[in-house]
Image (tube, rainbow, N blue to C red):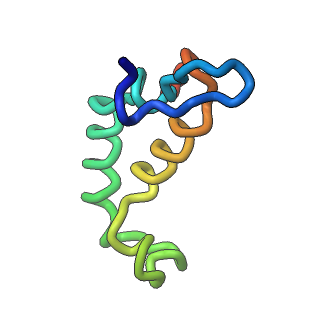
């Protein structure tokens, strides 16, 4: 039985596991986010003013978006 996080592909009528569920680069992202959070008091881009972006590191939301839209099996971190 497929997991709840899977989505059904209308073309193939099979359950598709998203790339973000298989190959999310958590250890690499953790190191990058730690460096970025340490340096954020030196450089704050204009997007820091916005409520949603203000609390999240750029490296984190960029990796989430990339991992979500890459085809299954495609490496996120390369």
Q: Among all residues in the image, which is located at the extreme right?
A: 11
Say left or right for 49 vs 13: left
Taking depth in this image into account, of 71 and 15 the one nearest to the observer is 15
Q: Position of residue 31 (x, y in %)?
A: 28, 38
Examine the rendered structure and indicate whether residue 4 appears above or below residue 45: above
Examine the rendered structure and indicate whether residue 53 appears above or below residue 16: below
- At 58% from the left and 18% from the top, the residue drawn is 14
Say left or right for 49 vs 33: right
- At 52% from the left and 75% from the top, the residue drawn is 47
Quarter of the image for the N terminus: give it: top left
Q: Position of residue 46 (x, y in %)?
A: 54, 79
Taking depth in this image into account, of 33 and 11 the one nearest to the observer is 11
Examine the rendered structure and indicate whether residue 58 appears above or below residue 76: below
Q: Position of residue 21 (x, y in %)?
A: 40, 28
- At 63% from the left and 25% from the top, the residue drawn is 71
Taking depth in this image into account, of 78 and 64 the one nearest to the observer is 64
- At 32% from the left and 48% from the top, the residue drawn is 33
Say left or right for 62 vs 40: right
């Amino acid at each position: 039985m497929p997991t709840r996080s899977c989505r059904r592909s209308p073309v193939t009528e099979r359950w598709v596991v998203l790339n973000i569920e298989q190959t999310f680069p958590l250890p690499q992202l953790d190191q990058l986010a730690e460096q970025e959070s340490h340096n954020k008091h030196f450089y704050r881009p204009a997007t820091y003013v916005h409520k949603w972006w203000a609390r999240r590191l750029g490296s984190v939301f960029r990796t989430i978006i990339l991992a979500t839209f890459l085809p299954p099996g495609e490496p996120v971190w390369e």
